[in-house]
Amino acid sequence: PLIYVLNGPNLNLLGTREPEIYGTDTLDDIAGRLDDQAHELGLEIDFRQSNHEGHLVDWLHEAQAESAKAVLLNAGAYTHTSIALHDAIKSIKVPVIEVHLSDPMKREPFRHISYVGMAAHSCFAGHGAKSYELALDAAARL
Ligand code: DQA
Protein backbone atom coordinates (compact mmCIF):
# COMPACT_ATOMS: atom_id res chain seq x y z
CA PRO A 1 0.00 0.00 0.00
CA LEU A 2 1.13 3.47 -0.98
CA ILE A 3 0.85 6.54 1.26
CA TYR A 4 1.42 10.05 -0.08
CA VAL A 5 2.98 12.47 2.40
CA LEU A 6 2.47 16.01 1.11
CA ASN A 7 4.04 19.10 2.65
CA GLY A 8 3.18 22.70 1.85
CA PRO A 9 4.85 26.09 1.99
CA ASN A 10 7.89 26.89 4.14
CA LEU A 11 8.21 23.32 5.40
CA ASN A 12 11.39 23.00 3.28
CA LEU A 13 12.94 25.31 5.89
CA LEU A 14 12.21 23.04 8.87
CA GLY A 15 15.21 22.76 11.12
CA THR A 16 16.01 26.46 11.01
CA ARG A 17 12.48 27.90 10.70
CA GLU A 18 11.21 29.12 14.09
CA PRO A 19 12.71 26.11 15.91
CA GLU A 20 11.04 27.17 19.17
CA ILE A 21 7.73 26.36 17.47
CA TYR A 22 8.59 23.67 14.95
CA GLY A 23 11.63 21.96 16.49
CA THR A 24 15.03 21.30 14.93
CA ASP A 25 14.32 18.24 12.78
CA THR A 26 14.62 18.94 9.07
CA LEU A 27 12.04 17.69 6.59
CA ASP A 28 14.65 15.15 5.44
CA ASP A 29 14.98 13.88 9.03
CA ILE A 30 11.20 13.42 9.17
CA ALA A 31 11.12 11.74 5.76
CA GLY A 32 13.89 9.33 6.79
CA ARG A 33 12.13 8.24 9.99
CA LEU A 34 8.80 7.86 8.18
CA ASP A 35 10.48 5.65 5.60
CA ASP A 36 11.73 3.31 8.34
CA GLN A 37 8.32 3.29 10.01
CA ALA A 38 6.56 2.66 6.68
CA HIS A 39 8.87 -0.29 6.06
CA GLU A 40 7.94 -1.80 9.44
CA LEU A 41 4.24 -1.28 8.69
CA GLY A 42 4.53 -2.82 5.24
CA LEU A 43 3.75 0.51 3.56
CA GLU A 44 5.46 2.52 0.88
CA ILE A 45 5.59 6.30 1.14
CA ASP A 46 5.94 9.01 -1.46
CA PHE A 47 7.16 12.12 0.40
CA ARG A 48 6.97 15.54 -1.25
CA GLN A 49 7.09 19.27 -0.48
CA SER A 50 6.02 22.29 -2.50
CA ASN A 51 5.57 25.99 -1.83
CA HIS A 52 2.90 26.13 -4.55
CA GLU A 53 -0.76 25.56 -3.80
CA GLY A 54 -1.53 24.12 -7.24
CA HIS A 55 1.15 21.45 -6.90
CA LEU A 56 -0.58 20.23 -3.74
CA VAL A 57 -3.93 20.14 -5.59
CA ASP A 58 -2.35 18.16 -8.46
CA TRP A 59 -0.72 15.72 -6.04
CA LEU A 60 -4.03 15.05 -4.26
CA HIS A 61 -5.54 14.14 -7.64
CA GLU A 62 -2.50 12.01 -8.39
CA ALA A 63 -2.85 10.14 -5.09
CA GLN A 64 -6.28 9.02 -6.25
CA ALA A 65 -5.05 8.13 -9.77
CA GLU A 66 -2.26 6.05 -8.20
CA SER A 67 -4.73 4.31 -5.86
CA ALA A 68 -2.96 5.52 -2.73
CA LYS A 69 -4.33 4.11 0.53
CA ALA A 70 -4.15 7.50 2.27
CA VAL A 71 -2.58 10.94 2.12
CA LEU A 72 -0.88 12.68 5.04
CA LEU A 73 -1.15 16.42 4.37
CA ASN A 74 0.65 19.22 6.17
CA ALA A 75 -0.55 22.10 4.03
CA GLY A 76 1.29 24.73 6.11
CA ALA A 77 -0.41 28.11 5.92
CA TYR A 78 -2.62 26.98 3.00
CA THR A 79 -4.46 25.01 5.68
CA HIS A 80 -6.04 28.26 6.79
CA THR A 81 -6.69 29.84 3.38
CA SER A 82 -7.21 27.28 0.67
CA ILE A 83 -10.69 26.46 -0.53
CA ALA A 84 -8.95 24.80 -3.50
CA LEU A 85 -7.31 22.27 -1.17
CA HIS A 86 -10.60 21.78 0.67
CA ASP A 87 -12.35 21.04 -2.63
CA ALA A 88 -9.54 18.75 -3.82
CA ILE A 89 -9.80 16.67 -0.64
CA LYS A 90 -13.57 16.45 -1.15
CA SER A 91 -13.03 15.51 -4.80
CA ILE A 92 -11.08 12.32 -4.09
CA LYS A 93 -12.04 9.13 -2.28
CA VAL A 94 -8.60 8.64 -0.75
CA PRO A 95 -8.72 9.54 2.97
CA VAL A 96 -6.62 12.58 3.82
CA ILE A 97 -5.13 12.91 7.30
CA GLU A 98 -4.26 16.48 8.30
CA VAL A 99 -0.89 16.87 10.02
CA HIS A 100 0.70 19.78 11.88
CA LEU A 101 3.85 19.99 13.97
CA SER A 102 2.35 22.73 16.15
CA ASP A 103 -1.22 22.91 17.40
CA PRO A 104 -2.81 25.71 15.36
CA MET A 105 -5.71 25.94 17.85
CA LYS A 106 -3.26 27.11 20.53
CA ARG A 107 -1.78 29.82 18.30
CA GLU A 108 -2.97 33.03 16.60
CA PRO A 109 -6.70 33.28 15.80
CA PHE A 110 -5.98 33.29 12.04
CA ARG A 111 -4.80 29.69 12.41
CA HIS A 112 -8.01 28.55 14.08
CA ILE A 113 -9.84 27.95 10.82
CA SER A 114 -8.74 24.87 8.87
CA TYR A 115 -10.21 24.49 5.39
CA VAL A 116 -8.19 21.28 5.16
CA GLY A 117 -9.59 19.98 8.45
CA MET A 118 -13.19 20.58 7.39
CA ALA A 119 -12.67 18.09 4.56
CA ALA A 120 -10.05 15.74 6.05
CA HIS A 121 -10.62 12.34 7.63
CA SER A 122 -8.78 13.17 10.87
CA CYS A 123 -6.00 15.32 12.26
CA PHE A 124 -2.77 14.91 14.24
CA ALA A 125 -1.36 18.20 15.51
CA GLY A 126 0.81 19.50 18.30
CA HIS A 127 3.15 16.50 18.67
CA GLY A 128 6.04 18.11 16.80
CA ALA A 129 7.61 15.84 14.18
CA LYS A 130 5.87 12.91 15.91
CA SER A 131 2.55 14.16 14.47
CA TYR A 132 3.67 12.56 11.20
CA GLU A 133 4.46 9.24 12.85
CA LEU A 134 1.11 9.15 14.66
CA ALA A 135 -0.67 9.97 11.40
CA LEU A 136 1.20 7.20 9.57
CA ASP A 137 0.17 4.70 12.25
CA ALA A 138 -3.43 5.86 11.83
CA ALA A 139 -3.15 5.54 8.04
CA ALA A 140 -1.88 1.96 8.42
CA ARG A 141 -4.99 1.08 10.44
CA LEU A 142 -7.51 2.55 8.00
C1 DQA B 1 1.92 24.17 10.41
C2 DQA B 1 0.96 25.15 11.11
C3 DQA B 1 0.54 26.25 10.16
O1 DQA B 1 -0.32 27.16 10.85
C4 DQA B 1 1.72 27.02 9.66
O2 DQA B 1 1.32 27.98 8.71
C5 DQA B 1 2.78 26.14 9.10
C6 DQA B 1 3.11 24.91 9.80
C7 DQA B 1 2.47 23.12 11.38
O3 DQA B 1 2.94 22.08 10.91
O4 DQA B 1 2.48 23.33 12.60
O5 DQA B 1 3.41 26.45 8.08
O6 DQA B 1 1.21 23.50 9.39
Image (cartoon, helix red, strand yellow):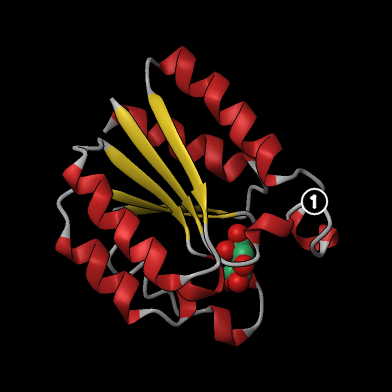
Look at mark 1 in the image and give the residue it sits on: 15
How many other residues sit within 10 Å of disc 1, few (<14), some (14-19) or many (≥20)?
Answer: some
Quadrant containing the N terminus is top left
Q: Quarter of the image holding residue 73?
A: bottom left
Amino acid carrying label 1: it is Gly
Q: Is residue 102 visible?
A: no
In the picture provided, is 49 more to the left or to the right than 17?
A: left
Instruction: Identify the residue at the far bottom of this view.
Output: 110
Q: Compare residues 107 and 26 and report the one nearer the observer.
A: 26
Q: Is residue 106 visible?
A: yes
Q: Quadrant of ligand 1?
A: bottom right
In the picture provided, is 141 more to the left or to the right than 18?
A: left
- The residue depicted at 37 percent of the width and 22 percent of the height is 43
- The residue depicted at 27 percent of the width and 46 percent of the height is 63
Q: Position of residue 22 (x, y in %)?
A: 74, 57
Callout count:
1
